């Protein structure tokens, strides 16, 4: 399993995008109940972003959205964070919205609210950034993300 994941990453690095996508798809199909199989789509997105192939990551994310019921809130949060960290704000918002609409679990919702606010802030959609960040601070005043959210809101006021 790890071999296939590594092979997919190597294929991406060599510019063999179709082969890499096929490798990750085979991994998911061959080992659907394994951690590697379940995270093959995530691995493709992560590997594509590591080699600067945002279009491959975007395509894999679109496939993820087409089968959104097959993915859990933590998986959408992980992908949302990857997208956010790589300046892909619109897809990150879409991923975090999936989490927000799918769960009330604090661990996942807290991260999604912060991600939504952060992505909107980075896109200079300041008014859109306020609501999820304020919701985070209201729902979870003891959150480890509370001060980071407050900092973003205070920066928004300065802009």
Image (spheres, rainbow, N blue to C red):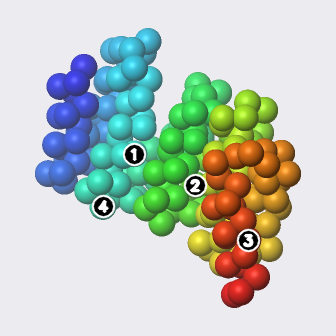
Mark 3 in CB contact with mark 1 (< 8 angstroms)? no
Marks 3/2: CA–CA distance:
19 Å
Foreground: 97 or 127?
127
Mark 3 in CB contact with mark 4 (< 8 angstroms)? no
Mark 3 or mark 2, whichever is nearer to me? 3
**On the image, numbered disc 3 is attached to which residue?**
153
**On the image, numbered disc 2 is attached to which residue?**
92
Q: Residues within 10 Å of mark 2 (few under 14, many from 20)?
A: many
Image x and y of residue 40, in percent: 38, 30
**On the image, numbered disc 1 is attached to which residue?**
45
Mark 2 in CB contact with mark 4 (< 8 angstroms)? no
Answer with left or right where residue 109 lies relative to residue 17: right
Residue 52 is marked as: 4
SS at circle 2: helix
Q: Is residue 122 in view?
A: yes
Marks 3/1: CA–CA distance:
30 Å
- Kindly identify the residue that appears in the image at 73 percent across and 30 percent down: 105
Image x and y of residue 1, in percent: 24, 20
SS at circle 4: loop
Marks 1/2: CA–CA distance:
12 Å
Q: Residues within 10 Å of mark 4 (few under 14, many from 20)?
A: some
Q: Is residue 116 in view?
A: no
């Amino acid at each position: 399993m790890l071999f296939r994941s590594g092979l997919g990453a190597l294929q991406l690095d060599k510019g063999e995008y179709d082969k890499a996508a096929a490798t990750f798809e085979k991994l998911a199909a061959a080992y659907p109940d394994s951690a590697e199989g379940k995270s093959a789509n995530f691995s493709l997105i992560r590997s594509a972003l590591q080699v600067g192939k945002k279009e491959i990551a975007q395509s894999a994310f679109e496939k993820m959205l087409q089968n959104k019921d097959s993915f859990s809130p933590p998986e959408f949060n992980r992908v949302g964070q990857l997208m956010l960290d790589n300046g892909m704000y619109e897809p990150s918002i879409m991923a975090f919205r999936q989490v927000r609409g799918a769960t009330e679990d604090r661990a996942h919702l807290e991260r999604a609210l912060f991600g939504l606010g952060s992505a909107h802030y980075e896109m200079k959609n300041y008014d859109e950034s306020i609501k999820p960040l304020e919701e985070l601070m209201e729902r979870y005043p003891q959150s480890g993300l509370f001060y980071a959210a407050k900092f973003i809101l205070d920066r928004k006021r300065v802009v």
